Image: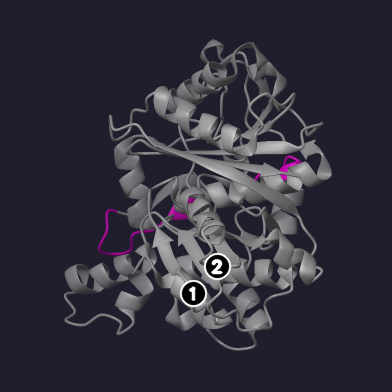
Amino acid sequence: MIEPIVVTGVGCVSALGLTADECWAAARDGQTGIRVTEFDTGPNGPGARSYPAGMVRGDATAALEAALGRRIGGSLDPFAIFALKAAHEALSQAGLSSQRLGDRAACVMGNGIGGLATLEKAYERLFGLKATKVHPLTIPRVMVSAPVSSVAMEFGITGPVFTTSSACASAAHAVAQGAALIAGGLADVAVVGGSEAMATPGGMRSWEGLQAMSETACRPFSKDRDGMVIGEGAAAIVLERASRAEARGARVLARYLGAGMSSDAFHWTQPTLEGPISAMRQACEAAGILEADEILISAHGTGTPLNDKNEAAAIRGLFGARAAAHPVIATKSAHGHVIGATAAVQAILTIKALEARVAPPILGYLGPDEECGGLALVVGERRPIKATSALVNAFAFGGLNCSLAFGA
Protein backbone atom coordinates (compact mmCIF):
# COMPACT_ATOMS: atom_id res chain seq x y z
CA MET A 1 0.00 0.00 0.00
CA ILE A 2 1.36 3.44 -0.96
CA GLU A 3 1.87 5.72 2.01
CA PRO A 4 -0.19 8.94 1.98
CA ILE A 5 1.49 12.12 0.78
CA VAL A 6 0.76 15.46 2.41
CA VAL A 7 1.45 19.14 1.77
CA THR A 8 3.48 20.82 4.53
CA GLY A 9 4.47 24.11 2.90
CA VAL A 10 3.44 26.48 0.11
CA GLY A 11 5.00 29.57 -1.42
CA CYS A 12 3.75 31.86 -4.16
CA VAL A 13 4.80 34.92 -6.13
CA SER A 14 2.27 36.36 -8.59
CA ALA A 15 0.50 39.51 -9.65
CA LEU A 16 -1.60 39.08 -6.51
CA GLY A 17 1.31 39.29 -4.05
CA LEU A 18 4.78 38.19 -3.00
CA THR A 19 3.61 35.46 -0.59
CA ALA A 20 1.04 32.68 -0.65
CA ASP A 21 -1.06 34.43 2.01
CA GLU A 22 -1.08 37.69 0.04
CA CYS A 23 -2.05 35.86 -3.15
CA TRP A 24 -4.84 33.98 -1.38
CA ALA A 25 -6.25 37.05 0.36
CA ALA A 26 -6.44 38.96 -2.93
CA ALA A 27 -8.03 36.06 -4.83
CA ARG A 28 -10.49 35.37 -2.01
CA ASP A 29 -11.57 39.01 -1.86
CA GLY A 30 -12.06 39.35 -5.61
CA GLN A 31 -9.08 41.60 -6.23
CA THR A 32 -7.25 41.54 -9.55
CA GLY A 33 -3.53 41.74 -10.17
CA ILE A 34 -4.04 42.37 -13.88
CA ARG A 35 -3.14 45.84 -15.13
CA VAL A 36 -2.59 47.40 -18.54
CA THR A 37 1.18 47.34 -18.96
CA GLU A 38 3.39 48.92 -21.59
CA PHE A 39 6.04 46.64 -23.07
CA ASP A 40 8.79 48.60 -24.80
CA THR A 41 10.99 46.74 -27.26
CA GLY A 42 13.59 49.50 -27.22
CA PRO A 43 15.26 51.39 -30.07
CA ASN A 44 15.83 48.22 -32.10
CA GLY A 45 12.27 46.93 -31.94
CA PRO A 46 8.90 47.81 -33.45
CA GLY A 47 7.97 50.19 -30.62
CA ALA A 48 6.02 50.05 -27.40
CA ARG A 49 2.80 48.04 -27.11
CA SER A 50 0.37 47.89 -24.20
CA TYR A 51 -1.46 44.77 -23.03
CA PRO A 52 -3.39 43.74 -19.92
CA ALA A 53 -0.94 41.55 -17.98
CA GLY A 54 -0.52 39.93 -14.59
CA MET A 55 2.89 41.32 -13.65
CA VAL A 56 4.56 40.72 -10.29
CA ARG A 57 4.29 43.91 -8.27
CA GLY A 58 6.77 44.66 -5.54
CA ASP A 59 10.42 43.72 -5.51
CA ALA A 60 10.67 39.93 -5.44
CA THR A 61 14.45 40.11 -5.78
CA ALA A 62 14.83 42.38 -2.74
CA ALA A 63 12.49 40.17 -0.72
CA LEU A 64 14.51 37.08 -1.66
CA GLU A 65 17.84 38.71 -0.91
CA ALA A 66 16.53 39.84 2.49
CA ALA A 67 15.41 36.29 3.25
CA LEU A 68 18.70 34.73 2.15
CA GLY A 69 20.90 37.45 3.60
CA ARG A 70 22.95 37.93 0.45
CA ARG A 71 22.79 39.33 -3.06
CA ILE A 72 21.60 36.94 -5.71
CA GLY A 73 19.60 38.88 -8.31
CA GLY A 74 22.48 39.56 -10.68
CA SER A 75 23.09 35.89 -11.40
CA LEU A 76 19.53 34.76 -12.14
CA ASP A 77 16.78 35.47 -14.66
CA PRO A 78 13.46 36.58 -13.17
CA PHE A 79 11.88 33.14 -13.68
CA ALA A 80 14.54 31.57 -11.44
CA ILE A 81 14.29 34.37 -8.86
CA PHE A 82 10.54 33.83 -8.63
CA ALA A 83 11.04 30.08 -8.19
CA LEU A 84 13.65 30.45 -5.48
CA LYS A 85 11.52 33.01 -3.63
CA ALA A 86 8.51 30.68 -3.68
CA ALA A 87 10.58 27.65 -2.67
CA HIS A 88 12.13 29.53 0.26
CA GLU A 89 8.68 30.48 1.50
CA ALA A 90 7.33 26.94 1.13
CA LEU A 91 10.30 25.31 2.87
CA SER A 92 10.22 27.92 5.64
CA GLN A 93 6.57 27.14 6.31
CA ALA A 94 7.38 23.44 6.30
CA GLY A 95 10.20 24.02 8.82
CA LEU A 96 12.84 22.78 6.39
CA SER A 97 14.58 25.91 5.12
CA SER A 98 17.40 25.94 7.66
CA GLN A 99 18.87 22.54 6.86
CA ARG A 100 20.52 20.79 3.95
CA LEU A 101 17.89 18.38 2.75
CA GLY A 102 20.23 15.76 1.29
CA ASP A 103 19.68 12.80 -1.00
CA ARG A 104 16.22 11.86 0.30
CA ALA A 105 14.85 15.15 -1.02
CA ALA A 106 13.79 15.96 -4.58
CA CYS A 107 12.95 19.08 -6.54
CA VAL A 108 10.77 19.08 -9.66
CA MET A 109 9.55 22.34 -11.14
CA GLY A 110 7.97 23.20 -14.46
CA ASN A 111 8.29 26.08 -16.87
CA GLY A 112 7.28 26.64 -20.44
CA ILE A 113 10.13 28.53 -22.04
CA GLY A 114 13.08 29.36 -19.76
CA GLY A 115 14.85 32.67 -19.17
CA LEU A 116 13.21 34.73 -21.89
CA ALA A 117 14.18 38.14 -20.48
CA THR A 118 17.85 37.16 -20.56
CA LEU A 119 17.55 35.68 -24.03
CA GLU A 120 15.93 38.82 -25.43
CA LYS A 121 18.66 41.03 -23.99
CA ALA A 122 21.33 38.80 -25.49
CA TYR A 123 19.67 38.85 -28.90
CA GLU A 124 19.26 42.61 -28.79
CA ARG A 125 22.98 42.98 -28.15
CA LEU A 126 23.91 40.59 -30.95
CA PHE A 127 21.40 41.47 -33.65
CA GLY A 128 20.33 44.98 -32.70
CA LEU A 129 23.47 46.59 -31.30
CA LYS A 130 25.82 44.38 -33.38
CA ALA A 131 27.83 43.51 -30.28
CA THR A 132 30.13 40.51 -30.38
CA LYS A 133 29.66 39.38 -26.77
CA VAL A 134 26.79 38.68 -24.39
CA HIS A 135 26.70 38.40 -20.61
CA PRO A 136 28.92 35.52 -19.45
CA LEU A 137 26.06 34.02 -17.41
CA THR A 138 23.63 33.99 -20.33
CA ILE A 139 23.46 30.19 -20.58
CA PRO A 140 22.91 29.53 -16.82
CA ARG A 141 20.27 32.25 -16.78
CA VAL A 142 18.42 30.98 -19.86
CA MET A 143 18.42 27.20 -19.33
CA VAL A 144 15.09 25.72 -18.29
CA SER A 145 16.69 23.89 -15.36
CA ALA A 146 17.95 27.11 -13.75
CA PRO A 147 15.12 27.26 -11.18
CA VAL A 148 15.51 23.70 -9.90
CA SER A 149 19.29 24.00 -9.85
CA SER A 150 19.00 27.21 -7.84
CA VAL A 151 16.65 25.60 -5.33
CA ALA A 152 18.81 22.47 -5.07
CA MET A 153 21.98 24.46 -4.44
CA GLU A 154 20.34 26.77 -1.90
CA PHE A 155 18.80 23.99 0.18
CA GLY A 156 21.25 21.14 -0.36
CA ILE A 157 18.88 18.89 -2.32
CA THR A 158 21.04 16.06 -3.66
CA GLY A 159 18.29 13.61 -4.64
CA PRO A 160 16.34 13.71 -7.92
CA VAL A 161 16.26 17.23 -9.38
CA PHE A 162 14.81 18.01 -12.81
CA THR A 163 12.50 20.24 -14.83
CA THR A 164 9.25 19.40 -16.59
CA SER A 165 8.32 21.43 -19.64
CA SER A 166 4.89 20.80 -21.13
CA ALA A 167 3.60 24.30 -21.83
CA CYS A 168 0.65 25.20 -19.60
CA ALA A 169 0.68 21.78 -17.90
CA SER A 170 4.32 22.01 -16.80
CA ALA A 171 3.72 22.70 -13.11
CA ALA A 172 0.95 20.11 -12.87
CA HIS A 173 3.27 17.49 -14.33
CA ALA A 174 5.97 18.61 -11.89
CA VAL A 175 3.66 18.10 -8.92
CA ALA A 176 2.67 14.67 -10.19
CA GLN A 177 6.29 13.66 -10.80
CA GLY A 178 7.42 14.83 -7.38
CA ALA A 179 4.64 12.80 -5.77
CA ALA A 180 5.63 9.79 -7.89
CA LEU A 181 9.21 10.04 -6.64
CA ILE A 182 7.94 9.87 -3.07
CA ALA A 183 5.49 7.06 -3.82
CA GLY A 184 8.26 5.13 -5.61
CA GLY A 185 10.61 5.37 -2.64
CA LEU A 186 13.16 7.68 -4.30
CA ALA A 187 12.48 10.59 -1.96
CA ASP A 188 10.84 11.40 1.35
CA VAL A 189 10.16 15.05 0.57
CA ALA A 190 9.85 16.97 -2.69
CA VAL A 191 9.74 20.65 -3.59
CA VAL A 192 7.43 20.89 -6.60
CA GLY A 193 5.79 23.64 -8.61
CA GLY A 194 6.68 25.94 -11.45
CA SER A 195 7.85 29.37 -12.54
CA GLU A 196 7.50 31.62 -15.56
CA ALA A 197 8.57 35.09 -16.68
CA MET A 198 7.63 35.31 -20.33
CA ALA A 199 5.72 38.60 -20.04
CA THR A 200 8.49 40.36 -21.97
CA PRO A 201 8.30 42.57 -25.08
CA GLY A 202 9.13 39.68 -27.38
CA GLY A 203 7.06 37.18 -25.45
CA MET A 204 3.96 39.35 -25.58
CA ARG A 205 4.40 39.99 -29.31
CA SER A 206 4.62 36.24 -29.82
CA TRP A 207 1.38 35.59 -27.95
CA GLU A 208 -0.20 38.41 -29.92
CA GLY A 209 0.80 36.63 -33.11
CA LEU A 210 -1.05 33.54 -31.92
CA GLN A 211 -4.21 35.67 -31.63
CA ALA A 212 -5.02 34.17 -28.24
CA MET A 213 -4.75 37.26 -26.03
CA SER A 214 -7.52 39.52 -24.80
CA GLU A 215 -7.32 43.27 -25.30
CA THR A 216 -9.45 43.82 -22.19
CA ALA A 217 -9.55 41.17 -19.44
CA CYS A 218 -9.56 37.46 -18.73
CA ARG A 219 -13.23 36.43 -18.48
CA PRO A 220 -13.41 32.64 -17.98
CA PHE A 221 -16.67 30.99 -19.04
CA SER A 222 -18.29 34.39 -19.63
CA LYS A 223 -20.18 35.63 -22.63
CA ASP A 224 -18.09 37.96 -24.78
CA ARG A 225 -14.83 36.48 -23.51
CA ASP A 226 -12.09 37.16 -26.01
CA GLY A 227 -8.84 35.60 -24.87
CA MET A 228 -6.24 35.01 -22.21
CA VAL A 229 -4.13 37.46 -20.21
CA ILE A 230 -0.48 36.57 -19.69
CA GLY A 231 0.92 36.59 -16.15
CA GLU A 232 4.22 35.83 -14.45
CA GLY A 233 5.38 34.38 -11.15
CA ALA A 234 6.06 31.10 -9.40
CA ALA A 235 4.61 28.68 -6.90
CA ALA A 236 6.22 25.96 -4.80
CA ILE A 237 4.65 23.16 -2.78
CA VAL A 238 6.38 20.90 -0.28
CA LEU A 239 5.16 17.31 -0.57
CA GLU A 240 6.14 14.85 2.13
CA ARG A 241 5.50 11.31 3.28
CA ALA A 242 2.76 11.54 5.87
CA SER A 243 4.68 9.48 8.45
CA ARG A 244 7.72 11.74 8.11
CA ALA A 245 5.62 14.86 8.53
CA GLU A 246 3.94 13.39 11.60
CA ALA A 247 7.24 12.29 13.13
CA ARG A 248 8.69 15.78 12.99
CA GLY A 249 5.46 17.50 14.07
CA ALA A 250 4.86 19.34 10.82
CA ARG A 251 1.53 21.03 10.20
CA VAL A 252 -0.36 19.35 7.35
CA LEU A 253 -1.98 21.87 5.00
CA ALA A 254 -3.61 19.38 2.65
CA ARG A 255 -3.43 15.85 1.32
CA TYR A 256 -2.18 15.05 -2.17
CA LEU A 257 -4.67 12.52 -3.54
CA GLY A 258 -3.44 11.75 -7.04
CA ALA A 259 -3.12 12.87 -10.64
CA GLY A 260 -4.39 12.09 -14.10
CA MET A 261 -2.47 12.65 -17.34
CA SER A 262 -3.37 12.33 -21.01
CA SER A 263 -2.46 13.56 -24.47
CA ASP A 264 -4.95 14.63 -27.13
CA ALA A 265 -2.48 13.74 -29.92
CA PHE A 266 -4.57 15.93 -32.18
CA HIS A 267 -3.71 19.63 -32.71
CA TRP A 268 -1.39 22.38 -31.45
CA THR A 269 -4.12 24.73 -30.22
CA GLN A 270 -7.45 22.93 -30.62
CA PRO A 271 -8.31 20.58 -27.74
CA THR A 272 -10.27 17.37 -27.85
CA LEU A 273 -13.01 16.48 -25.41
CA GLU A 274 -11.65 13.03 -24.61
CA GLY A 275 -8.21 14.17 -23.37
CA PRO A 276 -9.40 16.48 -20.57
CA ILE A 277 -12.10 14.01 -19.53
CA SER A 278 -9.49 11.24 -19.29
CA ALA A 279 -7.14 13.33 -17.13
CA MET A 280 -9.92 14.40 -14.76
CA ARG A 281 -11.32 10.88 -14.52
CA GLN A 282 -7.91 9.40 -13.70
CA ALA A 283 -7.34 11.98 -10.96
CA CYS A 284 -10.79 11.44 -9.46
CA GLU A 285 -10.40 7.67 -9.52
CA ALA A 286 -6.93 7.82 -7.98
CA ALA A 287 -8.33 10.04 -5.23
CA GLY A 288 -11.54 8.04 -4.80
CA ILE A 289 -13.69 11.16 -5.23
CA LEU A 290 -15.51 10.54 -8.51
CA GLU A 291 -18.83 10.12 -6.66
CA ALA A 292 -18.19 12.81 -4.04
CA ASP A 293 -21.13 15.09 -3.26
CA GLU A 294 -19.08 18.23 -3.86
CA ILE A 295 -15.68 18.72 -5.47
CA LEU A 296 -14.07 22.13 -5.84
CA ILE A 297 -12.89 22.38 -9.47
CA SER A 298 -10.10 24.82 -10.23
CA ALA A 299 -10.62 25.14 -13.96
CA HIS A 300 -7.92 25.73 -16.53
CA GLY A 301 -10.26 28.58 -17.50
CA THR A 302 -8.11 30.69 -19.80
CA GLY A 303 -10.90 32.95 -21.04
CA THR A 304 -10.47 31.90 -24.68
CA PRO A 305 -13.69 31.04 -26.53
CA LEU A 306 -12.62 27.52 -27.49
CA ASN A 307 -10.86 26.40 -24.30
CA ASP A 308 -13.65 27.38 -21.93
CA LYS A 309 -16.32 25.83 -24.14
CA ASN A 310 -14.34 22.59 -24.32
CA GLU A 311 -13.51 22.47 -20.60
CA ALA A 312 -17.14 23.07 -19.66
CA ALA A 313 -18.16 20.23 -21.95
CA ALA A 314 -15.48 18.00 -20.44
CA ILE A 315 -16.69 18.67 -16.89
CA ARG A 316 -20.26 17.90 -17.96
CA GLY A 317 -19.03 14.86 -19.85
CA LEU A 318 -17.34 13.43 -16.77
CA PHE A 319 -19.90 14.28 -14.09
CA GLY A 320 -23.11 14.38 -16.11
CA ALA A 321 -26.07 15.90 -14.26
CA ARG A 322 -23.91 16.09 -11.12
CA ALA A 323 -21.62 18.68 -12.74
CA ALA A 324 -23.78 21.45 -11.31
CA ALA A 325 -23.04 20.19 -7.78
CA HIS A 326 -19.34 21.03 -8.04
CA PRO A 327 -18.30 24.69 -7.62
CA VAL A 328 -16.00 25.89 -10.39
CA ILE A 329 -13.37 28.60 -9.90
CA ALA A 330 -11.00 30.14 -12.45
CA THR A 331 -8.25 32.15 -10.76
CA LYS A 332 -6.48 33.12 -14.00
CA SER A 333 -9.05 35.91 -14.07
CA ALA A 334 -7.17 37.42 -11.12
CA HIS A 335 -3.49 36.56 -11.69
CA GLY A 336 -3.34 35.92 -15.43
CA HIS A 337 -2.11 32.83 -17.20
CA VAL A 338 1.28 32.04 -15.69
CA ILE A 339 1.86 29.40 -18.39
CA GLY A 340 4.33 26.81 -16.98
CA ALA A 341 3.70 27.91 -13.37
CA THR A 342 -0.03 28.40 -13.55
CA ALA A 343 -1.16 24.98 -12.28
CA ALA A 344 0.99 25.36 -9.15
CA VAL A 345 -0.39 28.86 -8.49
CA GLN A 346 -3.90 27.46 -8.90
CA ALA A 347 -3.09 24.49 -6.66
CA ILE A 348 -1.99 26.74 -3.81
CA LEU A 349 -5.09 28.91 -4.08
CA THR A 350 -7.18 25.73 -4.18
CA ILE A 351 -5.48 24.34 -1.07
CA LYS A 352 -6.16 27.64 0.68
CA ALA A 353 -9.78 27.51 -0.46
CA LEU A 354 -10.26 24.01 0.95
CA GLU A 355 -8.72 25.10 4.23
CA ALA A 356 -10.94 28.19 4.50
CA ARG A 357 -14.02 26.44 3.05
CA VAL A 358 -14.38 29.43 0.73
CA ALA A 359 -14.25 29.53 -3.09
CA PRO A 360 -12.77 32.71 -4.63
CA PRO A 361 -14.83 34.41 -7.33
CA ILE A 362 -14.26 34.37 -11.08
CA LEU A 363 -13.55 37.96 -12.13
CA GLY A 364 -14.63 39.83 -15.27
CA TYR A 365 -17.80 37.79 -15.69
CA LEU A 366 -20.31 39.51 -18.00
CA GLY A 367 -23.04 36.88 -17.92
CA PRO A 368 -23.68 33.28 -18.94
CA ASP A 369 -22.63 31.75 -22.22
CA GLU A 370 -24.89 28.88 -23.19
CA GLU A 371 -21.86 26.93 -24.47
CA CYS A 372 -20.48 26.96 -20.91
CA GLY A 373 -23.76 26.12 -19.20
CA GLY A 374 -24.44 23.44 -16.62
CA LEU A 375 -21.61 24.50 -14.29
CA ALA A 376 -21.76 25.94 -10.79
CA LEU A 377 -19.54 28.91 -11.57
CA VAL A 378 -18.45 30.97 -8.57
CA VAL A 379 -19.02 34.52 -9.82
CA GLY A 380 -19.70 37.89 -8.24
CA GLU A 381 -18.23 37.20 -4.83
CA ARG A 382 -16.61 34.44 -2.81
CA ARG A 383 -18.83 31.54 -1.85
CA PRO A 384 -18.85 29.16 1.13
CA ILE A 385 -18.18 25.56 0.12
CA LYS A 386 -18.60 22.17 1.74
CA ALA A 387 -16.05 20.42 -0.46
CA THR A 388 -13.22 18.54 1.22
CA SER A 389 -11.56 17.60 -2.08
CA ALA A 390 -10.58 19.45 -5.21
CA LEU A 391 -9.41 19.07 -8.81
CA VAL A 392 -6.87 21.40 -10.42
CA ASN A 393 -6.98 21.30 -14.23
CA ALA A 394 -4.12 22.10 -16.60
CA PHE A 395 -4.81 21.63 -20.30
CA ALA A 396 -1.89 22.76 -22.44
CA PHE A 397 -1.27 23.67 -26.04
CA GLY A 398 -0.16 20.60 -27.92
CA GLY A 399 -2.91 18.61 -26.22
CA LEU A 400 -1.07 17.88 -22.95
CA ASN A 401 -3.48 17.41 -20.05
CA CYS A 402 -2.92 16.96 -16.33
CA SER A 403 -5.38 17.11 -13.44
CA LEU A 404 -4.34 17.08 -9.79
CA ALA A 405 -6.49 16.03 -6.83
CA PHE A 406 -6.08 17.41 -3.31
CA GLY A 407 -7.97 16.86 -0.07
CA ALA A 408 -8.43 18.95 3.05
What's the magenta bit mostly, secondary-structure-wise? loop
Identify the residue shown where x is 67% and y is 23%: 291
Look at mark 2 in the image and give the residue it sits on: 187
- Neighbor class of circle 1 (other Cα within 10 Å; few <14, some 14-19, many 20+) is many
Provide the secondary structure element on which disc 2 rests: loop
Amino acid beneath label 1: Gly
Identify the residue shown where x is 61% and y is 81%: 65
The numbered disc on residue 159 is: 1
Instruction: Kindly indicate the quadrant of the structure image that contains residue 12.
Output: bottom right
In the rendered structure, the answer to whether residue 53 lies left or right of residue 237 reads left
Q: Where residue 182 sits in the image (x, y, percent)?
A: 56, 61
Please say if the residues under marks 1 and 2 sit with CB atoms less than 8 Å apart.
yes
In the rendered structure, the answer to whether residue 292 lies left or right of residue 345 reads right
Instruction: Kindly indicate the quadrant of the structure image that contains residue 380.
Output: top right
In the rendered structure, the answer to whether residue 388 lies left or right of residue 189 reads right
Classify 287 as above or below 156: above
Amino acid beneath label 2: Ala
The foreground one among 322 and 21 is: 322
Give the spatial CA distance, label 1 vs label 2.
7 Å
Classify 161 as above or below 55: below
On whether residue 30 falls in the magenta region, the answer is yes
Instruction: Kindly indicate the quadrant of the structure image that contains residue 328.
Output: top right
The foreground one among 248 and 336 is: 248
Q: What stretch is highlighted in magenta?
A: 27-46
